[in-house]
Amino acid sequence: MTTTPPRHIGRAPSDPEPPVVVVVSAGTGNPSSTRMLADRIAQKTLDLLRESGMPASARVLELGPFAVDIARATIAGFPGEQLQAAIEELAAADALIAATPVYKAGVSGLFKSFVDVLENDLLVAKPVLLGATAGSARHALVVDDQMRPLFAYLRALAVPTSVFAAPEDWGATELGERIERAATELTAMLRAGVGEQIADRAWSGYQHQFAGNAARAERTAADLDFDSPLMRLAAGGRAGPGPAG
Amino acid sequence: MQFGIFSVSDVTLDPVTGYTPSEAERIDAIVRIAQRADEVGLDIFAIGEHHNPSFFSSSPTTLLAHIAALTKRIIASTAVTLVTTNDPVKIAEDYAMLQHLAKGRLDLMLGRGNTVPVYPWFGQDIRQGLPLALENYNLLHRLWREDVVDWEGSFRTPLQGFTSIPRPLDDVPPFVWHGAIRTPEIAEQAAYYGNGYFANNILAPNFHFRPLVELYRQRFAHYGHGTPEQAIVGLGGHAFIAKRSQDAVKAFRPYFEGSPIYGKSYRLEDFMHGTPMSVGSPQEVIEKTLTFQEGFGDYQRQLWAVDAMGLPVEMALEQVELLGTEVVPVLRKEMESRRAAGVPDAPTHASLVKAKYGDAEPRQPRPNPNRGDNLTDGSPYQDSDPAIAA
């Protein structure tokens, strides 16, 4: 449970490091259809990035092996060592592909529990592609009805197209087309550096946790704004606008 | 370096015996624990503040006054005084009174409290907890340092010509620690005033609080109170000790696993490895505590929780005994020998009196004659600045 805060500061257009796409899959089977969907999306994303002259790598974060860690972190209030490392990978990612199975007409509890232990500012302005699988096409809106608001809460940049796969989709060319469309959107956002531009200009406007896991979390005195109303109040002044009195 | 114990004042089922002590039994027990801490040479006894079951310590000044009367040299402190839901005027009065009765063996630790319903019970709103804490301390600070205070803020009713009585002992306020585990504004306030900063080093990964401690140190220096290394840092902790390591783990395990805080999350071994929790032989607890000095820098106060989670009083007393006889004497020597030159001890009443007056006699405020209405022009004390109207 020792933590070393990540030093990754987000992606600048001139960043020489190849981008990293992190795939979060809450599928539990082997093979899991959720993981298969996530892999297809990841592969298409990497292909498109390579074609556009931006070779990238993907890392897969299967949540299944973290099920117990996630439950413990929920109760304890802090993650264990391995889960902490996974959270740091997420924080350092340039883009995410998040995929979950649908259980009982909703996102899997494992997926939601994982999101619950993340800090509120961990994914601010991070491009995210949302995907889900289900045993019936009747669950098709779970991605947009449940995952999208969840990532809106996190202030992540969910791409316009969500990818949902019911059993009949696996044989249909339309699924491949949707995957390509969604991956194109993710790739465009990543290449444009939208997330970095937002974070560059507006990071201080979001609520943050000091020394948290977010890539740009304030960690030292140099990162903090001591002219905020609360900081002025802390230094014996008044909280209102204007210089400390 | 000060070493001591602190208690959250939980009244909890003993998971081994199935026995739940009464409030009366726990209150008697905590007095015995504090007395034993004094007898075995610990420096600090601190108690928390709560306003809901299953805790007993709603009135820390009453308890600490009693303990101060029964002890000889231990410093009584709060493990938290709620600076949000208590009126800062009442804090100023109550703790100045306690400071007199304890003959200066008193300091306090301020915190916000994190139990949502407590705020509305006292007419406050937890969403305003941080500005409330900051503003209330700003007022408290003045009430202890100025005979007559005019004040207006966002939360409390304004004060005009107010004098908090009694004035602090020797006109030297109790030393204040600000407790925080995630809020940089609290570290900033501690640094601004040159007060102590206390991180309750439990229930988190090892050295999780280092960035906040480091922030406090930097800002302490920024405000001209000394170097970052001279800032006044305290750490909480949780210890369970037995002569032999395996006996400690064996005896502690059922309490750990029965605890609603610990037992339903990570395993005991994970907590011992990954967090500051110290369970083992005296030597193991000594070695773990020394890592705190390496990780957080030289610090001034180490407190351990030893009576929580339903431990029977005899077991808690044994913990105090082992701390006082086997752990702390070694830590005192070791930490002293490793401490960098120029790092001060935590302030005490004696050191603060010395700093303020040198060899001169401390001020002893004597009120002017009562004019019956407390409002007539004139300063409240015979030696007050006559230019200030009370």
Image (cartoon, coloured by chain):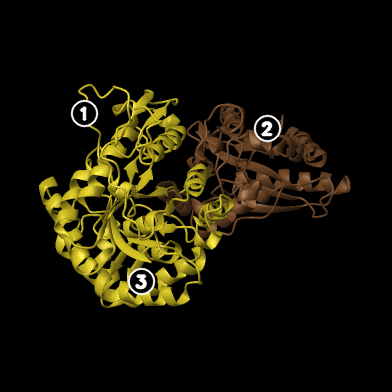
Are callouts 1 and 3 both on one chain?
Answer: yes
Q: Residue at x 45, y 49 (%)?
A: B181
- Taking the image as shown, residue B379 lies to the left or right of residue A221, namely left
- Residue position for label 1: B370
Pointer 1 and pointer 3: residues touching (CB < 8 Å)? Answer: no
Task: Say if residue B86 shows up in the picture.
Answer: no
Task: Look at the numbered disc 2 and give the secondary structure of its residue.
Answer: loop
Q: Nearer the viewer, residue B182 or A245?
A: A245
Q: Secondary structure at mark 3?
A: helix
Which corner quadrant holds the C terminus of chain A?
top right
Q: Residue at (67%, 45%) from the top-left corner?
A: A38
| Image coordinates for residue B37, horizontal then vertical, percent | 22, 64
Residue depth check, mark 1 versus mark 2: number of the one nearer the observer: 1
Find residue A180 and report its image quarter: top right
- Of all chains, the one bearing label 2 is A
Q: Amino acid at mark 3?
A: Val
Q: CA distance from mark 1 to mark 2?
A: 78 Å
Name the residue type under label 2.
Answer: Ser
Q: Chain of mark 1?
A: B
Q: Is residue A49 visible?
A: yes
Q: What color was chain A assigned in the picture?
A: brown
Chain of the residue that carries numbered disc 3 in the rendered image? B
Numbered circles on residues, count: 3
Instruction: Give the residue pinned by disc 3.
Output: B285
Decide: is B381 above or below A57. Answer: above
Rounded to the nearest whole Å, what is the CA distance between mark 1 and mark 3? 57 Å
Find chain B in the image and tell me its colour.
Answer: yellow
Which of marks 3 and 1 precedes in the sequence? Answer: 3
Indicate the position of residue B312 as horizontal and vertical percent values: 16, 59
